[in-house]
């Protein structure tokens, strides 16, 4: 009998234990907690603050900052994990993970066992994992110091996870669905579809290759998975998928599979080709790849072609899309190389769209012609003659490095890329800064900034309606609310140039010095800050996109307005989540 | 005066007895089924600066001194030849230039006296008494720096204390004119409060402070001239080395001892008693010690009284009391880590009242 199979309440167990044992064994009598409890780890990147449900009795617990959870009285059924924050990316986890009864690891691999009926051996075979690895008890992201304990398992679990997540992102974006229940249902459909592909043709392995780095994701399996997932979603009676079905009404499963699968296979393959052995490298890759919405955007942009009944007619488009996604997700490219490759791919996509239009008789979609981007997805930090580039790829990946405190005279150089005639409105901005594993955090919300576009660029002005509130918390748990910092934003009138090769310089030092004054930082805490900070930025009112046309993911920041009630100022809009490393 | 003090200290050396917000003597025997109503008014020495606020703060020098005034009404009933009960109600005001306290006090007791010839005594007595103090709030404006906040005003909302005491003793008489008693006792004291609020200055702005769970929350009181000052802040109380629950809601055990005498002659009845208490408090005294202060754990008081019976049923009296530490046993709710040093002060008070028998 396993511990989790015992039905006696703890007190009864203790009494029996004491009654039967010799006095000398009393001290060895295990506590009820240790006998009955069942611990585990939820991983999609470790999930912090996720909800873990024991399906047998619906007991619910939460994960800690490292994804660990514990059912104090054990769990006799399947385990379901949802919600929480992916500590690798800093983003909310929108899917749903499952694991069979008795498992102490919950991740994408165990999910396929539950939703698709795969055995552990079948999963290991299709992934080319050694038989010695226990998928039910081994946390793929388990750490041994600064390194992963099993980097092969980590890379391959990430590969599967990426396929499921990209399917979810792509179908949700293409069907214009944002609600989390629908995304969770798509995720489950994707996991089921992948498992069914593997079950149906075990000889066709999902991952092949002599080494992890040389591994290849079998495109046909991904195509089959995507085809099955879309087919199943469209046929589903699950009410949570109703809007997804409506959104995919014109989409042919074979067409979307043919268009997206090559990109997805290549994208997920990056985890193995660049197998991260250290936690920092793994998180950097997750930041770059897992957050990327390039494919979802391209599929949505080219949605009209997905009505094609002959998928081969859009194959050329799929190839160019794959080139774009590869460029966006390749961790080995410099920012300039990435930008150049993306520009080329976008040009080729335009050509491929024309070809697809000819082949299918479907009019080519109009690319987003009116948007703003930060030129080359990067800004520069200038100090005198020296200049260092901070790219979005660095920010969302390994983290943007900033010398701290700022050198006197530091300026941020920004150049906007205005495509078409972007329509702008009053700007709302929110920022959320926190430090991993610490309670120190800062959030701010700004509203009432007016924006206008001209040939010179984007003009931002403050007005009498400009408001700023902020909330700060230090590591000791002390909190501050600043309910009116509008004076700090008075007299703002700046134009961010959108002319080619023109940069706008924003002085940073004065802002820093003012922050020190406002916070009464007499001890110089701000200037002594160091380490890695999670930074989330949400901007509403500007049609911002990545330079490869990909819109930013919706995100939400809530800035507490009171410490005595739960009132908060919430801003939901296009956001960017990344890291900033402050180094002395 | 010198003679009086010498006499009082001599009495102290001879033995001590137990105190209570309302004075009680085992010699206050009544006839069966008789009632006694006692009205008492008590005053401090008006020149007393009981919190030493004027001494501590140069800005307060020359300002108004402290004042204490109290009034009490007690009703006693000898419901059995050897048993009696008493219920009392008191109102007290304590104020100085920066602090003001208004308190209501209740007291109830039951006692018995039985013939007991032990150690030459006439009777033995046992008394169970309970009393408590409460106030709508205790407000203080003594400036105090706590961490980065300078407290300008503090208020304990609805503080109350409760004490239960049991004492036993013996009475003797050497003649019809001279009577004596000695007693020992023990008891428990518990403090409670509903809320704590304070105002304090921080970074140039005034804040209203509230305790919320284990945090202190400050809300800015507008207007404040400092641009961009935080409108609210909260900090764990531990940041300031505070544990309000223990400081303002402490519990204690105490033991007491005392002795008294009574002399009746043609000039009336003269009484004196001395009482001592020693406390063992949970929480607050450890906090005081950590701040390198000295907690008050003992108190001695001496009470004297002269009564002249104008008739068989009307007895006016006056009294003079001395306390080695400030009102501690009478008003536990005033004692916390912020005020404990005040209790190191000695003080004296004057009493006057009437007893009616019916």
Image (cartoon, coloured by chain):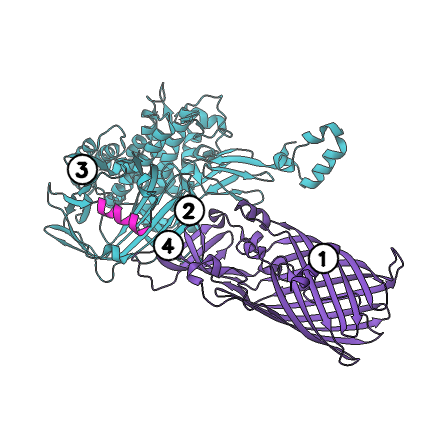
Q: Upstream in the sequence, badge 2 or badge 3?
A: 2
Tell which of A358 and B71 is nearer to you.
B71
Chain bearing tag 4 is A
Report the magenta residues as a range. A508-520
Tell which of A524 and B166 is nearer to you.
B166
Residue under pointer 4: A481
Residue under pointer 3: A383
Residue B296 visible from this viewpoint: yes
Residue under pointer 2: A236
Q: Please tell me whether mark 2 sits on a helix, a strand or a loop.
A: loop
Residue A341, position in %: x, y? 19, 32
Task: Check the rendered structure and report the hue given to chain B.
Answer: purple
Q: Is residue A414 left or right of residue B211?
A: left
Question: Residue sitting at 48 percent across and 52 percent down?
Answer: B215
Q: Please tell me whether mark 4 sits on a helix, a strand or a loop.
A: strand
From the viewer's perspective, is the residue at label 4 or at label 2 nearer? 4
- What is the C-alpha distance between the residues marked 2 and 3? 58 Å
Residue B60's disc number: none
């Amino acid at each position: 009998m396993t511990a989790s199979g015992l039905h006696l309440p703890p007190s009864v167990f203790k009494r029996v234990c004491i009654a039967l044992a010799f006095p000398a064994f009393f001290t060895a009598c295990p506590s009820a907690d240790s006998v009955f409890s069942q611990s585990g780890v939820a991983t999609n990147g470790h999930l912090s603050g996720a909800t873990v449900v024991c399906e047998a009795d619906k007991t619910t617990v939460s994960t800690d900052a490292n994804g660990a959870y514990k059912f104090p009285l054990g769990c006799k059924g399947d385990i379901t994990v949802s919600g929480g924050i992916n500590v690798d990316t800093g983003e909310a986890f929108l899917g749903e993970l499952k694991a069979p009864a008795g498992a102490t690891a919950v991740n994408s691999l165990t999910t396929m066992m539950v939703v698709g009926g795969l055995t552990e051996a079948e999963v290991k075979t299709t992934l080319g994992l050694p038989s010695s690895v226990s998928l039910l008890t081994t946390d793929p992201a388990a750490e041994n110091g600064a390194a992963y304990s099993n980097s092969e398992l980590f890379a391959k679990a990430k590969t599967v996870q990426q396929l499921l997540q990209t399917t979810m992102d792509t179908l949700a974006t293409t069907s214009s669905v944002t609600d989390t229940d629908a995304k969770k249902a798509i995720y489950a459909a994707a996991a089921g579809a992948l498992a069914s592909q593997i079950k149906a043709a075990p000889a066709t392995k999902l991952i092949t290759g002599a080494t992890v780095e040389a591994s290849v994701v079998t495109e046909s399996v991904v195509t089959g998975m995507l085809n099955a997932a879309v087919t199943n979603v469209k046929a589903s009676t699950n009410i949570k998928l109703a809007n997804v079905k409506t959104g995919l009404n014109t989409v042919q499963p074979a067409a979307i599979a043919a268009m997206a699968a090559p990109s997805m296979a290549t994208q997920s393959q990056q985890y193995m080709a660049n197998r991260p052995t250290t936690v920092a490298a793994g998180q950097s890759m997750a930041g770059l790849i897992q957050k990327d919405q390039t494919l979802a955007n391209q599929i949505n942009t080219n949605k009209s072609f997905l009505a094609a009944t002959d998928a081969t007619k859009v194959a050329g488009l799929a190839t160019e899309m794959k080139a774009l996604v590869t460029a966006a997700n390749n961790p080995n490219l410099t920012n300039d190389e990435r930008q150049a490759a993306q520009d080329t791919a976008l040009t080729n996509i335009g050509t491929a769209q024309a070809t697809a239009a000819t082949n299918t008789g479907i009019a080519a979609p109009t690319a987003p012609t009116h948007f703003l981007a930060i030129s080359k997805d990067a800004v520069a930090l200038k100090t005198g003659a020296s200049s260092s580039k901070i790219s979005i790829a660095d920010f969302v990946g390994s983290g943007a490095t900033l010398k701290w405190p700022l050198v006197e005279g530091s300026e941020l150089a920004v150049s906007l890329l205005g495509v078409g005639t972007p329509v702008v409105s009053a700007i709302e901005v929110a920022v959320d800064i926190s430090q991993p594993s610490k309670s120190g955090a800062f959030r701010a919300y700004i509203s009432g900034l007016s924006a206008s576009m001209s040939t010179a660029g984007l003009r931002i002005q403050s007005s009498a309606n400009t408001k700023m509130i902020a909330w700060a918390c230090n590591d000791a748990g002390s909190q501050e609310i600043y309910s009116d910092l509008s004076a700090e934003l008075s007299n703002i009138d700046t134009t961010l140039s959108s002319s080619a090769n023109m940069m706008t310089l924003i002085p940073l030092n004065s802002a820093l010095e003012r922050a020190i004054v406002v916070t009464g930082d007499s001890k110089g805490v701000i200037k002594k800050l160091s380490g890695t900070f999670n930074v989330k930025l949400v901007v509403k009112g500007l049609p911002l996109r990545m330079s490869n046309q990909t819109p930013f993911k919706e995100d939400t920041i809530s800035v507490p307005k009171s410490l005595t009630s739960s009132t908060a100022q919430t801003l939901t809009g296009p956001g960017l989540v990344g890291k900033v490393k402050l180094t002395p | 005066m010198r003679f009086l003090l010498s006499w009082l200290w001599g009495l102290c050396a001879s033995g001590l007895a137990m105190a209570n917000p309302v004075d009680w003597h085992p010699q206050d025997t009544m006839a069966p089924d008789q009632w006694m109503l006692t009205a008492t008014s008590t005053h401090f020495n008006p020149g007393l600066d009981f919190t030493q606020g004027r001494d501590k703060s140069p800005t307060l020098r020359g300002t108004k001194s402290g004042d204490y005034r109290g009034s009490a009404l007690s009703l006693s009933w000898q419901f059995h030849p050897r048993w009696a009960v008493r219920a009392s109600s008191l109102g007290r005001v304590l104020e100085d230039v920066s602090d003001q306290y208004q308190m209501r006090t209740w007291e109830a007791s039951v006692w018995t006296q039985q013939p007991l010839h032990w150690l030459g005594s006439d009777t033995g007595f046992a008394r169970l008494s309970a009393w408590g103090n409460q106030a709508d709030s205790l407000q203080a404006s003594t400036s105090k720096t706590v961490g980065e906040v300078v407290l300008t005003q503090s208020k304990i909302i609805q503080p109350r204390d409760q004490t239960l005491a049991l004492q036993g003793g013996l009475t003797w008489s050497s003649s019809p004119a001279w009577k004596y008693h000695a007693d020992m006792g023990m008891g428990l004291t518990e403090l409670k409060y509903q809320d704590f609020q304070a105002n304090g200055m921080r970074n140039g702005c005034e804040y209203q402070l509230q305790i919320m769970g284990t945090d202190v929350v400050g809300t800015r009181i507008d207007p404040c001239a400092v641009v961009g000052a935080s409108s609210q802040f909260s900090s764990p109380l531990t940041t300031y080395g505070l544990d309000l629950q223990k400081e303002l809601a402490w519990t204690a055990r105490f033991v007491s001892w005392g002795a008294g005498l009574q002399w009746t002659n043609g000039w009336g009845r003269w009484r004196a008693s001395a009482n001592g208490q020693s406390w063992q408090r949970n929480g607050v005294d450890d906090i005081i010690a950590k701040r390198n202060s000295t907690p008050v754990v003992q108190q001695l008081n001496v009470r004297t009284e002269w009564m002249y019976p104008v008739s068989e049923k009307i007895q006016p009296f006056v009294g003079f009391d001395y306390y080695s530490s400030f009102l501690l046993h009478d008003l536990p709710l005033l004692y916390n880590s912020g005020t404990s040093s005040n209790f190191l002060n000695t003080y004296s008070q004057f009493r006057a009242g009437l007893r009616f028998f019916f």
